[in-house]
Structure formats: C-alpha cells, structure tokens
Amino acid sequence: MTKPVVAIVGRPNVGKSTIFNRIVGERVSIVEDIPGVTRDRIYSSADWLTHEFNIIDTGGIDIGEEPFLDQIRHQAEIAMDEADVIILMTNGREGVTLADEHVARILYKTKKPIVLAVNKIDNPDMREMMYDFYSLGFGEPFPISGSHGLGLGDLLDEVAKHFPEDDEEQYGDDVIKFSLIGRPNVGKSSLVNAFLGDERVIVSDIAGTTRDAIDSPYEFDGQEYVIIDTAGMRKKGKVYETTEKYSVLRALRAIERSDVVLVVLNGEEGIQEQDKKIAGYAHEAGKAVIIVVNKWDAVEKDEKTMNHTTKVIREQFQYLDYAPIVFVSAKTKKRVHSLLPVVNRANENHSMRIQSSILNEVIADAVARNPAPTDKGRRLRIYYVTQVAIKPPTFVVFVNEPELMHFSYERFLENRIRETFDFEGTPIRLITRARG
Ligand code: GDP
Ligand code: GDP
C-alpha cells in the first residue's frame, strides 16, 4: 500500500517542527541507536483515526547558503513534488507577512490540495486574528496551537479529506519491488540504465494510478520486477537535488515501497558517514538488503582488493552482516546481470516461513549446546519459538522471564537460526515475550 504524503511548508518560526512532532508523536527511530547514525527527523510515518500517512517537515531541509526567500521557495517546491496534500502554516500572532505571501504565490502553481493552518492560536479569544488569513486565497484557515495541541484534529480531518482514493497495492504479490539508494553520484541512475538498457527489458508506464509514473516495471527470465522510484533518480537539475536531507527523503520513500533495497556504494571512494546512514534506514525498515559496490572498473586492484574491501564493509556496516556484497560496474556492465539472482534470493528469504516444529528443534539444540544465561540464580527458560511474520521474518521467543534474555544470547539464537536456514539478504527479528 502506498501511503499518502503530507508536507508542511511555511516560513521559519511559525511552528512547523512543533506541529510535525505533535503529529508523529512518540515514534522513536531504531536507526538512532546504531552508532554513527543520527538524524533530525524531517520525515516520518503518522496516523490519524483510520488513516496512515507519511509526513514531511520541509522546514528541516536546508539548502546551502541560499537567501532566505529562496530557501522557502525550494521547500515549497519539494512539497509540491513530493506530497499529496500540503499544509501551509502561518503564525496567527504576526498576521500575514510578506514571506507568507511569497510562499502562497509559489503554491498557487500547484493543483495539489492546500490546507491553511494558522498556528499559535493558543486560546479562543485569539481566533479574531485568523480572519486576515483568508486573504491568502486558500479558503478557510484552521486555527491551531502547537504548544497546546489544539485544533490538530480538525486540521487533520481536513487533510485526510484530500487523500487519494486508491490505497490498493499497485503490484501483484509475485512482483519483486526493489530500489537503489545511496549518496548522489555513486551511480544509481547508471545502474538502472544498465538494467533497463537491455533488449530483454519491457518497460511501460503503470496504468491506473493517480501518481506520476515513477517506477520502472520490467521482466527478466519469467520474473517481473519493479524498480521503485526511478524517476526520483532522474535529475531534474533542481538546486536541492544534491542536498543531503533531500536525498534522505527520497531514499526513505523508496525504501518504504521496496521488498529489496540495493545500497549502492562508490567503490572508487571510501565509505562515508552518509553511506552508513542510508544503509541504516534500509536495515531499520526491515527490508532485504544487498550492498552493491559500483564503479569497480575504476578501482586499481589486484587479487586481494575484493577481499579487503569486503572486510572493510563488514567492519563499517556491522548491523548488515546478512547483506550479500556484489561488485559491479554500471559503466562496463560487468556483473550487473549477476545482481538479479541475488535480488531473487534475498526476496525469497525475506518472505520465508519456517515450520514451528523444525524451528523448535533448532532452538532446543542450540540451548543444549550453549545453556541460557542465569542472573542472580534465575535461569532463562525458553518454552517455544514461533514465527509470527514475514518481510522481515519475525520470531517470538516465549520465555519465563524476558529480563533474563541478554542481547548476546539473542544474537546467539539468531545466528543458530541463520546457520540452519538460509536467511541471507534479510534481517530477522527476535521478540522475547513472557509466556502468558
Ligand atoms: P518552525 O521553524 O516553523 O519549524 O518553528 P518551530 O516549531 O521551531 O517553532 C518556532 C517557535 O514557536 C518555538 O519557540 C516554538 O516553541 C514556538 N511555537 C510553536 N507552536 C506554538 C504555539 O502554538 N504557540 C506558541 N505560543 N508558540 C509556539
Ligand atoms: P547517481 O547520482 O547515484 O544516480 O549517479 P549517476 O548514475 O548519475 O553517476 C554519477 C557519475 O558516475 C556519472 O558521471 C557516471 O557516468 C559515473 N559512473 C556511474 N557508474 C559508473 C561505473 O560503474 N564506473 C565508472 N567509472 N563511472 C561510473
């Protein structure tokens, strides 16, 4: 299911990030616990009543040294490109300013629905201040207070009215959806072209969607694929395309819709902080992950280089120890064809189900070899394990006292599961619960 996207725009200090945080609530990102990976959130899933959506705080996307009015113009453009519904936020205490009018004029160009929010209306007697805002030309303004959490329900009701109708999944279950993510210039678009350039490829626009055709469906060897969000990689020559926050935003959106994520690195350069962040997002989202080292043609190498690079990647991306590493060149197309079988396998493993009986045998055997930990004389007892989900495979371990489960023991069990079953390419999750 493709969730609708809402973007908040407006000049600085009107309260965009305050409202964003209110709307997304307490969603804590696991990525932030991975060393070296931090982010200020500008994009998150959220829900309101029965609606699930994603929300962007465009105010968090800073675009270099640009003058103030240009910054907010680019933020508004990003919203117009990315969102299904736009919230234009203003400050009721200051009335309509020139900067508000500037943003409004940019938004007149879009056909997308705009909902006007007037923030900092902290109490009912301040409602008078709102009437001024009709002049912006977006109809009835919605009074809200980010500090007090007032008016958000009515605002979100209005936003949800404009969500696109088609929520059904665009592609069949047997279609493998994958995306290529990575820093600018690592060669993502070149790789897509290397995939799609061949005569065997069938590319067509997707019929019946309200969105732009941003995906590239194709078929190879009887298997259907969709490369997600290919259009996001095509350069439109906009200033913000190379900013880090914008590439993160694109990456997160592509990851969300994929089964398998290809994390593309530039083999010519060392691994950078941003590579780790981007890979962290794919891991956190629970997607199958493949590490692709591109531009391998440009690397001066001998017979040891590949092993050495593999070692460095394993050290730098420890949480991705399950991800296969493939060395390719989009330029010469060397080994580009070997990627698809790896994608197929990762996808299969990502949705693999293990029978409970076999699973419990494996766990019993593991416990016999390496007894469960004790703490102050109490020993962890594992009663049984069962797989509760796929994509990624998720197992619940029922025990006597969950506090006795140590991270290292969980890791041991995960490794035993991995050694027995082929989960290459996919994260697996273990959840420890007390037996009810
Ligand atoms: P942004 O730049 O648009 O993201 O604005 P922020 O969310 O950072 O808010 C700017 C300032 O306005 C902060 O000091 C907030 O505490 C304050 N603020 C946000 N919402 C409200 C509100 O509803 N009422 C009042 N009085 N202050 C608010
Ligand atoms: P993107 O920003 O990640 O989509 O990267 P592009 O596909 O636009 O590639 C960035 C630059 O790297 C371009 O100049 C490409 O020609 C070059 N490039 C891409 N793949 C390779 C490769 O495998 N080998 C070499 N030598 N250059 C490459």
Image (cartoon, helix red, strand yellow):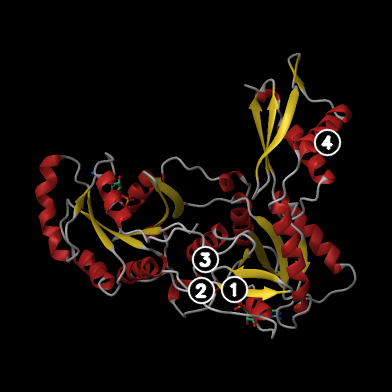
Question: Residue 362: which disc?
Answer: 4
Q: Is residue 327 visible?
A: yes
Q: Secondary structure at mark 2?
A: loop
**Which residue is under mark 1?**
217
Badge 3 crowding class, 10 Å Cα cut-off, few under 14, some 14 to 19, many 20 or more, is many
Q: Earlier in the sequence, mark 4 or mark 3?
A: 3
Q: Position of residue 23 (x, y in %)?
A: 37, 46
Q: Position of residue 128 (x, y in %)?
A: 9, 49
Residue drawn at (65%, 48%), measured in percent from left and top? Answer: 392
Query: Distance between the Cα atoms at labels 4 and 2?
Result: 44 Å
**Which residue is under mark 3?**
247
Q: Are discs 1 and 2 less than 8 Å apart at CB? A: yes
Q: Hey, which quadrant is residue 399 in on the image?
A: top right
**In the rendered view, does 383 fall on the left or right side of 2?**
right
**Closer to the camera: disc 4 or disc 2?**
2
Give the farthest residue toward the bottom.
Answer: 199
Kindly identify the amino acid type of the residue bearing the numbered disc 2.
Answer: Ile
Residue drawn at (17%, 65%), measured in percent from left and top? Answer: 136
Query: Distance between the Cα atoms at labels 1 and 3?
Result: 22 Å
Q: Is residue 13 visible?
A: no
**In the rendered view, does 80 fall on the left or right side of 356?**
left
Badge 1 crowding class, 10 Å Cα cut-off, few under 14, some 14 to 19, many 20 or more, is many
Residue drawn at (66%, 25%), measured in percent from left and top? Answer: 402
What is the tally of numbered marks visible in this picture?
4
**Which residue is under mark 2?**
206
Q: Position of residue 332 (x, y in %)?
A: 75, 83
Q: Earlier in the sequence, mark 4 or mark 2?
A: 2
Q: Position of residue 302 (x, y in %)?
A: 88, 73
